[in-house]
Image (tube, grey):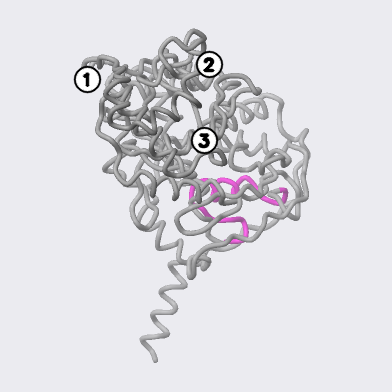
């Protein structure tokens, strides 16, 4: 009995966090215009509205469904509403949430809020972000309850998760790197939280830091590797990355689809110097175009037709108008399929999702667009056309078990 009591107190000591006293919502004019403007920039760089705005919802009012392998989470309201948002949070409470993943009331927050990365952000930047959020118009909106597999709805378990995976402290300074690279490292590893999607995760949902930026999964899409293993046919340069991050397209690489689209929309209005800093850091991780020679582009319609005749027929009817050699679209700055990284990847996840869900123009309804074929093609037909396209334009081996993977991808796009 004594041992049980001791264990209970030990567990309480590990998991308990005190509540921070409520404050009266600060008046917007209590913050200087300069700090609010700085916070607005940081919110763009951190993609705050991407996760904290529901489809057709009010900006930053939360309620967006965030599917995870452990169930569905719903983002919180981060407007200054005093009852359903963060209006009664002090700077101290906001900093603790961003760095430690603990709410004002002391409850542990799920790492869908990427405090694994936000923990690296400076006090000054967190305070500016706080000022920006507290100067927004309050929206009274309660997020739906999370739907997680038992017993993951028991928040004290997150204290143990943090002990394993939350690594606090600033982004390390690397001697000899340029100011632009250093700024890019801070933004990418911190507020930008790029590794949250582009790093593989372990069975408990923690980032595999030993494989940082080796590729991951985001909302059912494949987040490609941002290191030397990136499958691009042509090297990503700083210029190409900056163009892609602000327009959603690179003529030598690909178009932004799935969850990357809203990220591009957010970065399109961020300061160009900051986006370039991010591009500089990521390009360095991928080798700055010197790690390997550029690949010769493939186009083998005869061999692909012989291997996948059904796919060839489907491609001719539904895809060739935009994607075949000489198509008008290719003269408008759109990349040919031989350049599309998703088609070259060893993992077909994003290629599947692009065909099933299509691609929406990411910036102000402008830019690359592709219709969805989820209701037009069967799983086998999508598998056929993808394998034909891969054989014709990349010369790489056919994906195995593709129809089953298409079926799984179809289920994922039907989730909330």
Image: magenta residue range: 87-106
* 195 vs 165: above or below: above
- Residue 113 percent coordinates (x, y): 52, 47
Q: Which residue is under mark 1?
A: 291
Mark positioned earlier in the residue sequence (1 or 3):
3
* 115 vs 72: above or below: above
Mark positioned earlier in the residue sequence (3 or 2):
3
Q: In which quarter of the image is residue 385?
A: top left
Q: Does the magenta stretch include residue 96?
A: yes
Q: Are marks 3 and 2 in contact (CB under 8 Å)?
A: no
Give the residue drawn at x 51%, y 68%.
Answer: 154
Using residue 229 as the reference point, say whether residue 47 is left or right of it: right
Q: Which residue is under mark 2?
A: 272
* 222 vs 13: above or below: above
Q: Which residue is under mark 3?
A: 258
How far, Cα to Cα, is label 1 from label 3? 29 Å
Of labels 3 and 2, the one closer to you = 3
Judged from the image, the secondary structure of the residue bearing numbered disc 1 is loop
Of labels 2 and 1, the one closer to you = 1
Q: Is residue 60 visible?
A: yes
Q: Can residue 285 be seen in this view?
A: no
- Residue 388 percent coordinates (x, y): 35, 30
How far, Cα to Cα, is label 2 from label 1? 27 Å
Give the residue drawn at x 25%, y 29%.
Answer: 396
Disc 1: CA contacts within 10 A as few (<14), some (14-19) or many (>=20): few
């Amino acid at each position: 009995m004594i041992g049980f009591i001791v264990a209970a107190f030990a567990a309480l000591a590990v998991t308990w966090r005190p509540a921070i006293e409520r404050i009266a919502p600060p008046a917007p004019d209590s913050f200087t215009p300069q700090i609010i403007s700085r916070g607005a920039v940081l919110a763009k760089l951190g993609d705050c509205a991407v996760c904290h705005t529901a489809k057709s919802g009010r900006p930053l009012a939360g309620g967006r469904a965030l599917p995870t392998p452990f169930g569905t989470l719903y983002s919180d309201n981060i407007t200054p509403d005093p009852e359903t948002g963060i209006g009664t949070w002090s700077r101290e409470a906001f900093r603790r949430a961003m760095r430690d993943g603990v709410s004002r009331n002391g409850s542990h927050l799920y790492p869908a809020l990427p405090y694994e990365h936000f923990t690296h952000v400076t006090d000054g930047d967190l305070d500016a972000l706080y000022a920006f959020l507290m100067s927004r118009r309050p929206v009274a909106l309660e997020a739906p309850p999370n739907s997680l597999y038992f017993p993951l709805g028991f928040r004290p378990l997150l204290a143990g998760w943090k002990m394993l995976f939350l690594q606090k402290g600033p982004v390390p300074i690397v001697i000899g790197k340029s100011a632009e690279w250093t700024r890019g490292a801070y933004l990418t590893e911190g507020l930008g939280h790029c590794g949250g999607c582009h790093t593989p995760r372990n069975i408990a949902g923690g980032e595999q830091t030993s494989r940082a930026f080796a590729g991951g999964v985001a909302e059912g899409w494949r987040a490609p590797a941002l290191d030397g293993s990136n499958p691009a046919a042509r090297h990503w340069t700083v210029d190409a990355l900056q163009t892609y991050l602000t327009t959603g397209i690179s003529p030598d690489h690909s178009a932004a689809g799935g969850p990357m689209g809203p990220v591009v929309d957010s970065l399109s209005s961020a300061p160009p110097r900051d986006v370039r800093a991010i591009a500089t850091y990521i390009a360095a991780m991928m080798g700055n175009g010197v790690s390997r020679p550029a690949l010769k582009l493939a186009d083998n319609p005869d061999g692909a037709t012989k291997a996948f005749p059904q796919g060839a027929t489907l491609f001719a009817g539904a895809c060739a108008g935009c994607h075949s050699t000489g198509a008008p679209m290719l003269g408008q700055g759109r990349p040919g399929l031989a350049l599309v990284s998703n088609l070259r990847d060893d993992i077909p996840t994003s290629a599947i999702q692009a065909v099933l869900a299509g691609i929406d123009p990411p910036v102000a309804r402008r830019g690359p667009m592709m219709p969805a074929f989820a209701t037009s093609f069967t799983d086998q037909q999508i598998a056929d056309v993808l394998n034909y396209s891969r054989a014709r334009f990349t010369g790489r081996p056919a994906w195995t078990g593709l129809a089953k993977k298409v079926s799984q991808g179809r289920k994922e796009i039907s989730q909330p």
